[in-house]
Image: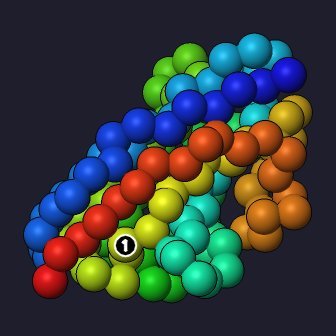
Amino acid sequence: QVQLVESGGGLVQTGGSLRLSCAASGRTTNRSARAWFRQAPGKELEFVAAISGSGEGTSYADSVKGRFTISRDNTKNTVFLQMNSLKPEDTAVYYCAARFNRNAVVVTSTGYEYWGQGTQVTVSA
């Protein structure tokens, strides 16, 4: 099975930046699409960004487009989320997800079978 571990969360001021990382271990392939979702307390899980297995295709939620960038390293076992111009409404637990042996991105949580434990991002006003 695939294990995903997020890191890089923290507390920043409005307008600041953070870079989240998600390391994968276990049975993975370079054809596995990866995604980031987030969930604020009392709210539903929300799609943030996704990247195809090849790294050539990306998708972003309208709320983060132009501010966040998803990427993956050359071995495709780690995915990143660079978050710039952070806003208080970005405050949430951010989760990394993967769909094994599926190259194409999807924007629904049901499309992903593996999930990390989450990392907290807090943006102060």
Q: Quadrant of residue 61?
A: bottom right
Question: Going 58% across and 53% down the picture, which residue do you hit?
Answer: 95
Residue 54: horizontal and vertical position, in percent? 66, 37
Q: Residue at 51% across / 84% down in the picture?
A: 62
Q: Is label 1 in a helix, a strand or a loop?
A: loop
Q: How was this image coloured?
A: rainbow
Number of labels in the image equals 1
Locate residue 34, reporting x and y percent: 66, 45
**Residue 29 image position (x, y, % from top left):** 77, 22
Q: Which residue is drawn at 24% across and 71% down?
A: 123
Residue closest to the eye, 34 or 26: 26
Specify the quadrant of the image occupied by residue 110. bottom right
Q: Position of residue 98 (x, y in %)?
A: 73, 42
* Quadrant containing the N terminus in the rendered view: top right
Q: Is residue 52 visible?
A: no
The amino acid on which the numbered mark 1 sits, given as a three-letter code, is Thr
Q: Judge by depth and name the residue closer to the eye, 7 or 35.
A: 7
The residue labelled by disc 1 is 91
Residue 45 appears in the rendering = yes
Q: Is residue 42 left or right of residue 110?
A: left
